[in-house]
Image (cartoon, grey):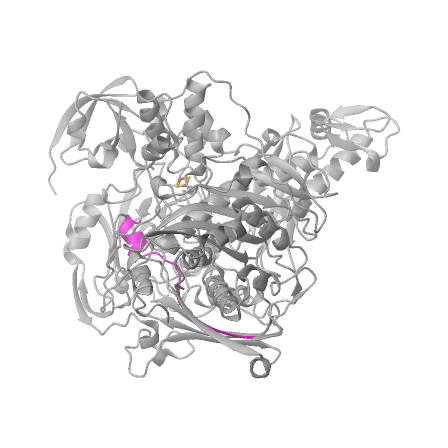
Amino acid sequence: MPTRKRTISLTVNGKRMRLRIETGETLLDVLRRCSYLSVKRGCDNGACGVCLVLLDGKPVRSCGVRAEQAEGCQVQTVEGLSSPTELHVIQRAFIETGAVQCGFCTPAQILAAKALLDQIPDPTEQQAREALGKVLCRCTGYVRPVEAVLRAAAALRGEVLRPIVPVRMVLPEAGAPIELPEAYRRGEAVHGALPPLVFSPLGMEKTRVVGQPAAKVDGEKLVRGLPVFTDDVRLEGMLYGALMTSPHAHARIKRIDASKARALPGVHAVLTFQDLPRLKHASGGQSYPQPPPYDQVCLDNKVRHVGDRVAVAAAESLALAEQALELIEVEYEILPAVVDPEMAMAEGAPVIHDEPDTAGIYDPLRNMVHHIEAEVGDVEAALAAADQVFAGEYRTPKQQHVHLEPHVCITYWDEDARLVVRTSTQVPFHIRRMLSPLIELPVKRIRVVKPRIGGGFGNKQEMLLEDLCAHLTLATGRPVRMEFTRTQEFISSRCRHAQILRYRIGVKDGKVSGAELYLIGDTGAYGTHGLTVQMVGGFKGLTLYNAPNSRFTCDVVYTNTTPAGAFRGYGAMQCQFGMEVLMEEVAERLGRDGVEFKRANWIRVGEKMHLSAALGEGREGIEQTLSSSALEECVAIGMDATRFSAKRQAHRGQTGRLRRGIGMAVVLHGSGVAGLDMASATLRMNDDGSFHLLIGATDLGTGSDTILAQMAAEVLGVRVEDIFVYSSDTDFTPFDKGAYASSTTYISGSAVRKAALEVRDQIREYAAGMLQGARASELVLEGGAVRAPDGQSVTLAEVALSSLHQRDQRHIQASASHVSPVSPPPTAAQFVEVVVDTQTGEIRPERLLMVVDCGRVINPMTAAGQVEGGMAQALGFALTEEMLYNDVGQPLNPQLGRYAVPKAGDMPPADVIFVETDEPSGPFGAKSVAEISIDGVAPAMVSAVHDATGVWLRELPLTPRRVLRALEGEAPAR
Ligand code: FES
């Protein structure tokens, strides 16, 4: 495609520049080409705002500005905001408030804040929200970014700022009243972020670094916009890969001719199914052996959903690669498509996987990937003997992850003829193992490097680009970069499983005596994660109330829609949604208070989790008992903080157009996969008494690098700054199964703690030889030194220098691995307050509060950020987010804007209270926090809407149309 070039002059960060640009290039393209890599690309239509820069002081999305329009303008990016030694006040505020998670949106948010504060030195919270509304953030729920803007404003006005410290309180003995600080006790929605409030049980062991709101170890590089993400490098000779996707939901490729594409100058490779070996695999990044079926090949002669892979090209530029794809001639035999999972199981439905070489599909002719049955006790007998039996059907939609950094991957040969895969993945070690057979290279010739990840939420627990990118490097010998467009994220990556949940429960003497869940899980076109998501969902859904007679039956079904995969919540959030709403409905029908009815039935400490042995993750599980829970206290504290009972009372008999409601849900989750998830850590001591912590765990923005450093620092008696975390590179860091299943704090943390204890013991033993008459077992590590009871001490630097260079030389270092036979559930109570407009059906959320027991809170700031962000994603799931398809499988809303995720202005005040427990199997008593945060909003929202209006809603999202239909009595329930 011929392009015209011209020269423009502009000033970037105060530096005058003359740049050669091509016609049509955007300011975003030019800035990134000129290494202003803080400016990110997150979408195709200007909706996400992560490319925001200041143009003559005004915030603009640089993807929407043609480069020539910037002629003569002043452009500011985050790179120009700070000096090498000093951060800008706004950057500091983002770190101090914990506003940075993955950091992909952070430079744009900081610039949006700057534009606001340059104009309005004393903004309101609303103005801060409006300014941040230009930039989507999927991690934070905007709670801390808003706080950062207000804090930066105060700092710029010269006000003295108080450090943000969590409020810590002792949890009273059972039954004693719990005193909440007044700020948390307000009956109305609070404004701004409250510091995390942490209740600790009496007698919980004191810690020094663990439990502190340490700043993220990667915070500074993220607020500076340094080039830390996968796409922030340019390799010599790098080619650009592009993916051709199917326009049809179901079709056979009768003929494909890539000769014209290959003949295009600048195109180096075009690959179709004719060019690659047909090697069956599953793309879900799970432990070996991955659960069946292996129903995918890198490129196939059949397409099974719009967005399915058809061909790839590598060329000198992305535009050329895309042009090449347009020249590929494809003749499709279009096949009937099926998008409804119940229709897909019907006799005579189109068969989606009719290929003969996929083994392990339960019933291919009925598109049933898996059929799962698990039972404890005797459910039929329990239901027959029950006082009453209740049933309810609930439906949840496909949801897209919308991590702001798309899937992106760069592959290249290194100087030792090994293939390097630089990729934004949650599972680097799984990728190395899974990729090896597909490209026919042994594992030892593959190195997977994970830079910082711009969000993942489960979607990067999947091999989606790495195999194609690697094939292009194999074909060309050149480095190749591939990235999904935002539309491809919707149609070609993964999504949450849509589920149909049919519950039956029997109640005898006020107790749930029997429970049954029949689940239909829509896995889309491929079965990746289909088995495990539903098994986890069934287990969690039926364990919350833990009936001794429980049965889970499930059909996992193919449809001609986007494949479903891992997504934060992993089936548990859908199944608990159904169970929670049913429990509230049952309480109403029994004339009982909903909270009391649930309290009488929820699982308690010491109870065996009845289905734990029958329902593992992809296999049989391990029998487990609930070893810690503060669910009782979480509910009590949340009810107090929201004045739940008084509001419920006040809401009775409401009339008028606008009606208020308050709702509550209880949830539990897990901490890793029992008996399967394994992580390792290596700690090495440096000459100055600092340490390198090498981990295979992957920080998606959750702050896991930080909390793992805190754990090591706690044991070694040093500061977090003395621990340098390096993760993850399959050549240099030890194995970790990756970031999923809420396992990093619990499993990887235990590995770090073990390695740190081993290093501590080595230090004590060595130091004992440096101190007169000292016994190793009596030495204490604190303040960067080793101290003896008699007052003698030696610094860690002295220990390190001596051990490395002088006496009895050795490198003080240790590696440790951890696998847990249990997966202790965190528990939580979610509260939601709403106003329902009974004329429009709109639900306006007024407040979200989650009270969480995640064991010991390792870092209240990052943990609170996890909960706030999880609640925001859950709010989208409850109210607006739904991937829609027409009857022939065409996606109807595969773009940001048409698919509505919460923006800063959509978020109500959202706060978090932690109630600690001392989980005996967890590192320092910790359990997990990342996933439970997403589980409760939807059922609590339904509960609140019922409180406001008296109707039950059983299908998500709660769109105005569904609310109105329910209010009008039209098919309110299934
Ligand atoms: Fe905003 Fe991750 S921190 S998208």
Where is residue 32 shown, x and y percent of the image?
Answer: 29, 33
When the figure is inspected, residue 171 is found, relative to residue 826, above or below; the finding is above
**Residue placed at 64% from the left, 52% from the top?**
818
Number of marks in the rendered image? 0
**Residue 761, magenta (yes or no):** no
Where is residue 244 shown, x and y percent of the image?
Answer: 24, 56
**Residue 499, magenta (yes or no):** yes
Figure quadrant of the C terminus: bottom left
Along the line of sight, which residue is nearer the eye, 92 or 393?
393
Image-quadrant location for residue 512: bottom right
Figure quadrant of the N terminus: top left
**Which portion, as a residue range, is magenta?**
484-506
Extreme residue toward the right, this view? 773
Within the displayed image, which quadrant is ligand 1 positioned in?
top left
Along the line of sight, which residue is nearer the eye, 694 or 840?
840
**Residue placed at 72% from the left, 43% from the top?**
204
